[in-house]
Amino acid sequence: MTTQILLCMIIDANAVCSPWCMKQQLQHILEASALSKKEAALYMAGLALGAAPASAYAAKARMNRVTAYTTLEHMVRRGLCTAVRRDRAKWYAPVSPEALALEARKNVDALERALPELRSLRGAEHREPMVSFYGGWDGVRHVYEHTLTASGEILNFANSATVRAHWERYDDEYIAERVRRGIHLRGIAPDDRAGRGVQGRDSESLREIRLVPATDFDFDNEINIYDNTVAITSFGRDPAEMFGVVIESREVAETQRQIFEMAWRYAGMLQRLPAQ
């Protein structure tokens, strides 16, 4: 889970929850960040207590003292807490939330780097095409986040104006994150004002865009091809019609990759034609 998602979940929880509900939400967020239920409870207790002995943590988290001590020692070994001797007793203090979020980000980045190897471990019986459907705006965002797991180049059919009309901070959020991860993109887009504007920023956005006549190729959906995956997003005319589809299939991805390369060559030929 990335730092950005962690912060968004905390903001959402704070907006709609009572103090008790907020505590439960934070507990779930911490557990989703690779802390056990006991570790999450003790971490939140530590934020309220500061440096304190295991007995204080146990009382605050309503946990058996021995269990609290054993869990705190494990958290020290994991780097989630620090421990010092004070008054002939061991006192514990949690690392800052920022440090915890940074560690969670490192874990996510490491997992994403390992995705190709993990996928290769699938047995033949698990290699049939997998199709996942995601509805609404949250579903569309999920599909975009999935494209950021690409281990290599993304091939893209898109309407530059459409996505930015629905996602005002698309360039600041999605494009910036793709660039940060070093994922190059080749794309084909309609030759309109938005398409030409996007193409003009190619060098700083780690991409190469070729334009095709908007009168003939005014794409409604966006298609991204990467690894063994084809990701499709459709914005529709209102939020209720938005959806995303992720197809994981080597054969489907390879066919779509060949279609893209054919279109890419065609777009290149158009660019070389003298201006009318």
Image (spheres, grey):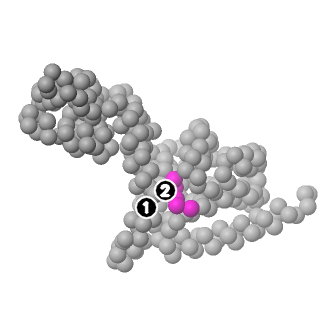
Between 158 and 272, the one nearer to me in the picture: 272
Q: Is the N terminus in the top left, top right, bottom left or bottom right quadrant? A: top left
> Residue 69, image x and y in percent?
14, 36
Q: Main secondary structure of the magenta part?
A: loop
Is residue 214 toward the left or the right of residue 157 in the image? Answer: right
* Residue 125 counted in the magenta span: no
Image quarter of the C terminus:
bottom right
Task: Identify which residue is drawn at 17% across, 29% down.
Answer: 90
- Counting from the top left corner in percent of width and height, residue 6 is at 39, 38
Name the residue type under label 2: Thr
Asked which quadrant contains residue 165, the reply is top right
Judging by the rendered image, the residue that carries numbered circle 1 is 115
Residue indicated by mark 2: 149
**Going 56% across and 73% down the picture, which residue do you hit?**
254
Splitting the image into 4 quarters, where does residue 78 fall? top left
Q: From the top left corner, tell me how far across and down residue 20 is, in percent.
A: 22, 27
Q: Which is nearer the N-term, disc 1 or disc 2?
A: 1
Task: Write down the region rendered in magenta.
Answer: 147-152
Q: Is residue 274 above or below residue 235?
A: below
Q: Nearer the viewer, residue 111 or 128?
A: 111
Residue 167 vertical placement versus 54 (above, below): below
- Left-right relation of 105 to 228: left
Residue lying at 24% horizontally and 24% vertically, measured from the top left: 51
Query: Do the numbered discs 1 and 2 sit on residues whose CB atoms are within 8 Å?
Result: yes
Q: Is residue 33 at all visible to an observer of this figure?
A: yes
Q: How many marks?
A: 2
Which secondary structure, mark 2?
loop
Q: CA distance from mark 1 to mark 2?
A: 8 Å
**In the picture, residue 31 is in which quadrant?**
top left
User: Callout 1: helix, strand or loop?
Assistant: helix
**Extreme residue in the bottom direction:** 124
x and y percentages locating residue 71 in the rendered image: 17, 40
